[in-house]
Image: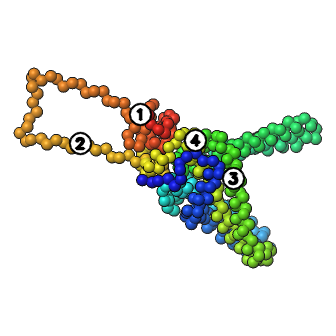
Amino acid sequence: MATSAFDLEPMSIGDILDRTVRLYQRSFLHTVGIAAVPYLLIIPLAATLGSVMWIKPAPALLRNPGLIAGAVLVALGFGLVFMWLNFMSMGALARSVSEQYLGRVPSFEGCYGPVVRRTGALLWTYSLSSLLGGGLFLLGVIAPMAIAIAVGQTSILLLVVFGIVAIAGVVVSVRIFLRFFLVTQVVVIEDVRGREALGRSWILMSGNESRAVLISLFGIVVSYIVSWVLNLPVYVLAPKGSGPASVILGAVAWGLGQVVSIPFMSIPLTLLYYDSRIRKEAFDLEMMAQNLGVSGGRVAATDTLLMADAPPTRSEPPRPFAADQTLVTSPSAPPPSAPAPPAPRRPVGAFKVCPKCAAQVPLVRPACPTCGTPLPFRSGG
C-alpha cells in the first residue's frame, strides 16, 4: 500500500513551489532523464547545423532548388519529431510527478509507456486548444489591431474603440491560455481527451489563473538563471563568433539548460492539478493512494495511474451431498416463499455505482464514463 510523500491537503503557492524543489531533489536523475529525451535529437542537430554554417558552400549549391527543398523538408521533419517528443516528455513528467506525490516509485518505462499509447489523444487535445486559442487571438487581437491601424488616420474614435477591443482580446486570450494549462495532466492521469479534456482543464483552472501565472514566472526565472550559469563557461572558453566550437558548445549549453529547467514548470503544474481536485471535488487523496493499481472500466483500458484495489469476491463452497440422498417435497410442507427483492446496488470494493445507469465507476473518476453523470468521490452510505 502506497503512502503519500506529503500531507494530502490544499496547498498554497509557497507549498507548491517548496514541494516542487523537494520532489526534484529526490529523483533528480530520473526527472532529468525523462526531460532529456527530446533534446537527444535536437542538440546534435543544432550543433551540426551551427557547424555547417561556418562552411562556405559553392554558389551553385545555394541555387539548387532540389537541395534547398530537401534541406527544408529535413528541418521540418526534425521539427515535427522534436515537437512530438516534447509532448511525450511533458506527459511522462506529469505521470512521474503524480506517482511520486502519491508515494509510488516511478520508472522510466512506466512513465513513458502509457503516454506513448495516448499520443493521439495528446495531439488532438493540443490541436483543439491551439485552434481555439489561436482563432480567438486572431479575431480578438490581430483583426482589431489591423482595423485600428487602418482607420487610425481617418478617425480617432474608431482607433480608440478598436484599440480597446484589441486589449480586451488580449485579456480573454490570456485567460483561455491559462485555463488550458492542465490539459496534459487531465489526458495522462484521467485518460480524458479532446473537448472533454479542455472542459475538464477549464473547470480545474477556474480561480487558479493567478497561481498559474506565478508558477510560469517561477519557471521562467529558473530557466533564465540555469541558462546563464551554463552559458557563462561557453562565453569564457569559446567567445561568440570564434568558430564552430562556440556554436557546438552553445547548443549543448542551451539543451542542458532546457533539460534541467523544464521540470520546474511541469512539477508545479501537476501539483496544482491535485490541489485543484482537492479543493473543488473533495478528492480524498489518501483513499486514492491506498487503492492504486486496480483496473476497471474505461480507465483500465489505458492503464491509468489512479485506480483502486477491489478485493476478489469469494463464492461459498458447495455442501457435501450423500449418494443416497434424495430431494423430496413433503405434501404438507409450505411452498417456498418468494425470494426477497434484491437490495439496491451499492459500491463494491473500490467502485461506486452510477445512480442513472447503474454502471460501476472507479472511485477516482469524477463522472460516470458511460452516461456522464457527475459523481462525488465519496460514495454514499
Specify the amino acid type for callout 4. Answer: Arg
Q: Percent from the top left, x then y, of residue 243?
A: 77, 77
Residue underneath mark 1: 381
Identify residue for label 4. 279
Residue drawn where x is 71% and y is 65% of the image: 227
As measured in the structure, the alpha-carbon distance from the residue carrying label 2 to the one carrying label 4 is: 43 Å
In this picture, residue 245 sits left or right of residue 328: right
Say whether marks 4 and 3 touch (CB < 8 Å): no
**Residue kind at label 3, given as amino acid type:** Ser
> Nearer the N terminus, badge 2 or badge 4?
4
> According to the image, label 3 marks what residue?
216
Q: Which sits earlier in the primary sequence, circle 3 or circle 2?
A: 3
Which residue corresponds to the image point at 44% horizontal and 37% vertical from the top-left?
Answer: 379
Q: Secondary structure at mark 3?
A: helix
- Residue found farthest to the left: 324
Residue at point 91%, 41% (across, down): 152
Q: Nearer the viewer, residue 77 or 104?
A: 104
Q: Quadrant of residue 247?
A: bottom right
Q: Which residue is mark 2?
A: 316
Total tally of numbered discs in the picture: 4
Locate residue 26, reporting x and y percent: 55, 62
